[in-house]
């Protein structure tokens, strides 16, 4: 369905949801397809990789680079939605204080918790629960699972134990509470949680997630997803640059985990990983350069003056939206705002005014900042809807206010 057709079906509450999220600097996941303007070329090459390389057994890492406001998170969301539409399983984790990349288990747990695909809901627990509840019989399934390409014996045994937990009658002396407790142990193990060897021994599971066996966990998960007819797995991690403000020891641990994920990709199939970064991560002395084991793997990223649409680096900052693309985005915002507040924004906020916003931002050297443009257009629409004459709005003042809002959002992130 095209964005135009979707827009025609948009209800006022849905439109207002979009506007309110845009005020905060993000786009609701359900509506990212409205805002593909200007990124079609990058998305075309990513889609080609997914269809003709990753789905055929390839594996790849790419870095999405851009400054604050260039639309990295939004672009990653577009990749996620495209991958889901193509039949991949997808997980998108934002690296925060609660999800510190210097703790590998925390990153895995976040990715496992955000897993989406050809099933209702999200999370590896949900996937396992739906799969085990909908099985009709055990039959030859244990041997099929053990023999899946890339499947680790511990992961296979955990799947078989979960299947038997669901389907086998209670043993003599076993209670329903014990059965549920055993199932909870298995779910926790799949999520990468800490489980004791004593608790795992009855299921013939002898390892918990750690850095050393992470590639076996990842490959086994991909094997299982492929068994469930997914084309592969796409992992996206956002805001990797947060580690640059941390201590040397924390940064080194974080960069070691990035190196580990890159290494895992080189030993995997049907896997695509994306990291979003700001340019300083690739250029500054506190970035990847500070960790030799990682820098030796990525030092060629971004080298060369020309753009390579198939390369490892997706450079959003060097591919800003054109005047025509920003005007198209402004028109989309105007229509959504009109639906949201049930007013004729198009008759009062004319294209000429949106073009003035564009020219003002260009004059100030801020043309690549898409988030700033969106904030300004919404602010002008708000003021006009509330009765102010749009021709009397001081656009220079508005851009200063929008920049101040952005700085606060950036410091609060």
Image (tube, rainbow, N blue to C red):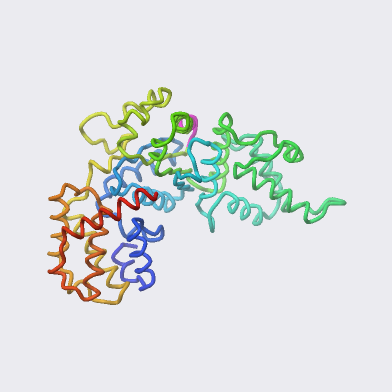
Image position of 164 with respect to 219: above or below: below
| Quadrant of the drawing holding the N terminus | bottom left
Q: Residue at x 56, y 38 (%)?
A: 105
Q: Nearer the viewer, residue 116 or 231?
A: 116
Q: Could you say which quadrant of the image residue 277 lies in?
A: top left
Image position of 384 with respect to 49: above or below: below
Q: Residue at x 27, y 72 (%)?
A: 338
Q: Could you say which quadrant of the image residue 225 lies in?
A: top right
Within the magenta stretch, is there residue 48?
A: no
Q: Residue at x 58, y 37 (%)?
A: 217
Labels in figure, total: 0
In this image, 75 relative to 175: left or right?
left
Span highlighted in magenta in the image: 263-269
User: Where does the image place residue 364, in percent across and percent down from the top left?
Assistant: 15, 49
User: Where does the image place residue 403, in percent across and percent down from the top left?
Assistant: 25, 53
Q: Could you say which quadrant of the image residue 31 lies in?
A: bottom left
User: Where does the image place residue 259, in percent across and percent down from the top left?
Assistant: 45, 29
Q: Nearer the viewer, residue 359 or 145?
A: 359
Image position of 64 with respect to 69: above or below: above
In this image, 375 relative to 267: left or right?
left
Q: Residue at x 63, y 54 (%)?
A: 129
User: Where does the image place residue 111, in percent across and percent down from the top left?
Assistant: 51, 45
């Amino acid at each position: 369905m095209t964005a135009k057709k979707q827009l025609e079906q948009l209800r006022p509450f849905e439109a207002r949801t979009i506007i309110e999220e845009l005020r905060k600097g993000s786009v609701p996941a359900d509506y990212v397809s409205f805002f593909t303007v200007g990124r079609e070329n990058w998305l075309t090459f990513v889609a080609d990789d997914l269809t003709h390389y990753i789905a055929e057994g390839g594996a790849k890492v790419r870095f999405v680079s851009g400054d604050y406001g260039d639309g990295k998170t939004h672009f990653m969301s577009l990749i996620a939605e495209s991958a889901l539409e193509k039949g991949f399983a997808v997980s998108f984790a934002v690296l925060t204080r609660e999800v510190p990349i210097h703790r590998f288990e925390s990153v895995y747990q976040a990715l496992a918790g955000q897993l989406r695909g050809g099933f209702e809901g999200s999370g590896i627990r949900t996937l396992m629960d739906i799969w085990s509840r909908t099985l009709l019989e055990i039959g030859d399934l244990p041997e099929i699972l053990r023999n899946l390409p890339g499947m680790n014996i511990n992961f296979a045994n955990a799947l078989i134990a979960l299947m038997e937990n669901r389907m086998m009658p209670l043993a003599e002396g076993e209670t329903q509470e014990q059965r549920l407790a055993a199932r909870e142990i298995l779910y926790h193990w799949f999520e990468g949680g800490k489980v004791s060897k004593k608790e795992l021994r009855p299921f013939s599971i002898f390892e918990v997630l750690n850095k050393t066996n992470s590639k076996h966990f990842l490959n086994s998960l991909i094997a299982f997803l492929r068994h469930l007819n997914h084309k592969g797995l796409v992992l996206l991690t956002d805001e990797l640059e947060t580690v640059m403000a941390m201590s040397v020891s924390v940064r080194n641990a974080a960069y070691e985990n990035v190196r580990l994920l890159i290494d895992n990709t080189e030993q995997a199939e049907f896997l695509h990983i994306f990291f979003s970064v700001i340019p300083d991560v690739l250029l500054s002395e506190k970035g990847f350069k500070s960790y030799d084991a990682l820098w030796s793997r990525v030092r060629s990223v971004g080298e060369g003056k020309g753009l390579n649409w198939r390369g490892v680096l997706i450079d959003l900052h060097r591919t800003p939206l054109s005047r025509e693309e920003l005007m198209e985005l402004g028109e989309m915002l105007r229509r959504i705002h009109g639906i949201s507040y049930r007013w004729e924004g198009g008759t009062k906020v004319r294209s000429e005014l949106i073009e003035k916003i564009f020219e003002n931002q260009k004059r100030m050297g801020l043309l690549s900042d898409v988030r700033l443009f969106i904030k300004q257009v919404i602010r002008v629409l708000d003021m006009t809807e509330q009765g102010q004459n749009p021709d009397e709005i001081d656009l220079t003042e508005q851009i200063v206010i929008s920049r101040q809002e952005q700085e606060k959002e950036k410091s609060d992130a």
